[in-house]
Amino acid sequence: MIAIPTKSSHTGQDYLPKNVTETTKRSPNQSLLPLTAKINPHDHLEIGGCDLKTLVQQFGSPLYILDETTLRTACQQYRDNFKTYYQGESQVIYASKAWSCLAVVGVIAKENLGFDVVSGGELYTTQKALSQLGYSCQEIAQKIYFHGNNKSVVELEQAIEVGCTIIVDNWLELETLAQLGNSSPNRTIPILIRLTPGIECHTHEYIRTGHLDSKFGFDPNQLEAVFTYLTEHKSLDCRGLHAHIGSQIFEKQPHQDLAGVLVEWLKIGQEYGLTLPELNIGGGLGICYTEEDDPPSIEEWVKAVSEAVMKACKRSEIPLPKLIAEPGRSLIGSACVTAYTVGSRKEIPEIRTYIAVDGGMSDNPRPITYQSAYRVVLGNKMSAEINETVTVAGKHCESGDILIKDAQLPQTHPGDILVIMGTGAYNYSMASNYNRLPRPAAVLVHNGEANLILRRESYDDLIRQDCLPQKLLS
Ligand SMILES: *Cc1c(COP(=O)(O)O)cnc(C)c1O
């Protein structure tokens, strides 16, 4: 689906989506650049109608540039394809750990998606954004699902206050919730039960076992004990089951198998007299970080999951549950790029050439954490011939602070703009202030307009929480 830079064509143009007229029909997760990416007459990369070099001049560097069209298109493709392929009710919820901030919540809420949150902080952010957007308390409660393998009592109370569905991970949490439920007898607490289904995916391997070594969720051998407990604790309103099997997955079979297993378990629960009207299949669909990545489209994934759930329900003779999916990366990953400014260069003859940029592991910890691969273009000279192999390094005091090893680029000079693609998911949300670098700004681009959605941190922001004990002052 995506352009593959070949030996014969060697410019940044090769990374552009080919069929520009059908922008919103392409699956964002199969595109390296955001769907609106173009080269403008200045030979600059343009996203959402905005010239990247101009954006950097205006908002500074490094800069996260989030394309509203790509993000909305991914939301629409998930939402609408579930309507097309699944005959029951469905809901898509955004795994906000991929990137949680008010504006991202805002755009995704406008597309009618819900939100999965995994901490009091993500819950707070999501709730604040939704209430500022004018959603009622009841609507907010219905949109949010609260995850986490070690929620504190304070977080659980916060979730009960919001009224969102809590995805229960373990016995301590189940028992704590039952207690909290008893102390407010007029209302029940909506929950889902998270299970570890014995299906595990890493990008290139897929394991199916009876039990899994994972910190998340109940082991399946606890299932009947959990169902018994639920029948005895009426303050807990168990809405159904949940599982999430991994991330950056390129196969459809694991989720199809998962659907089969979860539906069998729903049936067992229903035999205990629980209604269990919801089934949450998790997220995990992969995206293209490089031309070698080959994930199914959003439509193909949704179709496969929908058909597998419907088939399993037919086999188990249970009514179709409300089907919930909670993608993160495949909703937002391809919608964002990070622009950096080129600085120093170090050539080690016959070994390697480094070019350094003004960010690194603090704004994108994925390469150092997961050895993740990325692709880069020279945003201010898109048609320049690619004729160098260089390593793009960050500016942190860490030899491993390498953004891209052996990147293919044209000749670069200090001040050039490097654009790294696919930085929407797990970049800003995992960013740090290592070496006391202020976190970059982020802009939302659409139709030639850029809106600041995250201010660049200032040095004062960096010392905001610092305290100098009085005794040091005397
Ligand atoms: C991380 C996570 C997701 C989202 O995963 P992606 O790979 O980003 O789609 C969904 N559900 C749970 C429980 C998660 O932990």
Image (cartoon, rainbow, N blue to C red):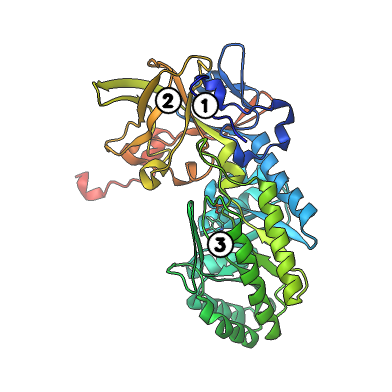
Q: Is any atom of residue 137 visible in this view?
A: no
Pointer 1 residue: 5
Q: Is residue 367 above or below residue 137?
A: above
Q: In which quarter of the view is residue 158 placed? A: bottom right
Marks 2 and 3, the one that precedes in the sequence: 3
Label 1, residues with CA under 10 Å away: few <14, some 14-19, many ≥20 = some
Pointer 3 residue: 244
Q: Give the residue drawn at x 37%, y 47%.
A: 369
Callout 3: helix, strand or loop?
Answer: loop
Mark 2 Cβ inside 8 Å of ligand 1: no
Q: Give the residue drawn at x 58%, y 84%.
A: 224
Across and down, in percent, residue 322 comes to 73, 65
Across and down, in percent, residue 65 comes to 55, 31
Q: Amino acid at mark 1?
A: Pro
Q: Is any atom of residue 184 visible in this view?
A: yes
Q: Nearer the viewer, mark 2 or mark 1?
A: 1
| Disc 2 from disc 3: Cα separation | 36 Å
| Disc 1 from disc 3: Cα separation | 34 Å
Q: Nearer the viewer, mark 2 or mark 3?
A: 2
Callout 2: helix, strand or loop?
Answer: strand
For the residues bearing labels 1 and 3, Cβ distance under 8 angstroms = no
Q: Quadrant of the C terminus?
A: top left
Pointer 2 residue: 408
For the residues bearing labels 2 and 1, Cβ distance under 8 angstroms = yes
Q: Is residue 259 left or right of residue 407?
A: right
Marks 2 and 1, the one that precedes in the sequence: 1
Mark 3 Cβ inside 8 Å of ligand 1: yes
Q: Nearer the viewer, residue 446 or 371?
A: 371
Q: Nearer the viewer, residue 82 or 351?
A: 351
Q: Nearer the viewer, residue 333 or 397?
A: 333
